[in-house]
Image (tube, rainbow, N blue to C red):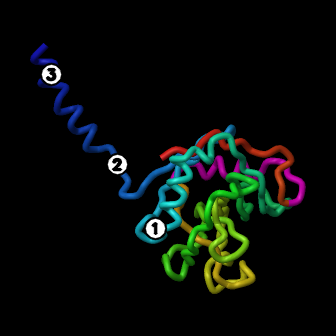
Amino acid sequence: MKRFIIYIWPVLFLFSCSQKKSEFPLITISTNYGDIEAELYPAKAPKTVSAFLSYIDKGFYKNTTFYRVLKDEEMPTDYNSGLIQGGVWPNLKTVPGIEHEATNQSGLTHASGTLSMARTGVGTATTEFFICIGDQTSLDAGRSGTQDSLGFAAFGKVIRGMSIVRKIQATKSNGDQFTEKIKIIDIKN
């Protein structure tokens, strides 16, 4: 038995040292299409990340949906761009708006895979978020993606599961609404 422990210990040590750990908080968005893993950037968007993590801790995202999609119906899935949006809709009336952290302050941009908060006005973002598919830098501050030119608050990025995001985007829709909402089973950190 001692010989087995002596031989297995270095293997376990090497295996545990080889496991890559992220310097960023990680979340998993579990859907009926599969899991999407993302890292969040609290050093760049502290208020947004803090609020999003608090919603996860409170269980807000359990049994919610991705319900909105932007895509070009004529484009093949692998080349399509746009976004999928989900969260608690309609928004919970008791959730205060998050102070807006514009991309010109955070240094983040709406590249493919970016997680960002949906909003109607400055400080109105609550539980709704979206995932960018393809270049969506028009949603950055100073660009034309919002009427006030302040853009949306990017706060994270998909690191595994963009194929799931694209599969969700390709699901049948009527205008910008999925014909059948895509289930978010839960989001965990």
Q: Which structural element holds mark 1?
A: helix
State whether residue 151 is above or below residue 12.
Answer: below
Tell me if residue 64 comes above or below residue 75 in the rendering: above
Residue 160 in percent (x, y) is at 53, 50
What residue do we see at 71% from left, 42% from top? Answer: 183
Residue extending farthest to the right is 174
- Work out whether residue 113 or residue 116 is closer to the camera in this orientation and state it: 116
Please say if the residues under marks 3 and 2 sit with CB atoms less than 8 Å apart: no
Residue 120 against residue 51 in the figure, above or below:
below
Residue positioned 65% across, 57% down in the render: 94
Q: Nearer the viewer, mark 2 or mark 1?
A: 1
Q: Which mark is residue 2?
A: none
Element at badge 3?
A: helix
Q: Which residue lies at the image location 12% right of the left edge and 24% below the top edge?
A: 6
How far apart, in angstroms, are the residues tagged by discs 3 and 2?
25 Å
Q: Quadrant of residue 145?
A: bottom right
The CA span between labels 2 and 1 is 24 Å
- The reply to whether the magenta stretch includes residue 139 is no
- Near-viewer residue (2 or 129): 129
The part of the chain drawn in magenta is: 159-175
Whichever of callouts 3 and 2 sits on the residue coming sooner in the sequence is 3
Which residue is labeled 3 in the image?
Answer: 5
The residue at the point 86 percent across, 47 percent down is 179
Indicate which label's residue lies in the foreground, 3 or 1: 1
Circle 1 crowding by C-alpha within 10 Å: few under 14, some 14–19, many from 20: some
Quadrant location of the N terminus? Answer: top left
Residue tagged 1: 46
Residue bearing mark 2: 20
Residue 41 in the figure: left or right of residue 139: left
Q: Amino acid at mark 3?
A: Ile
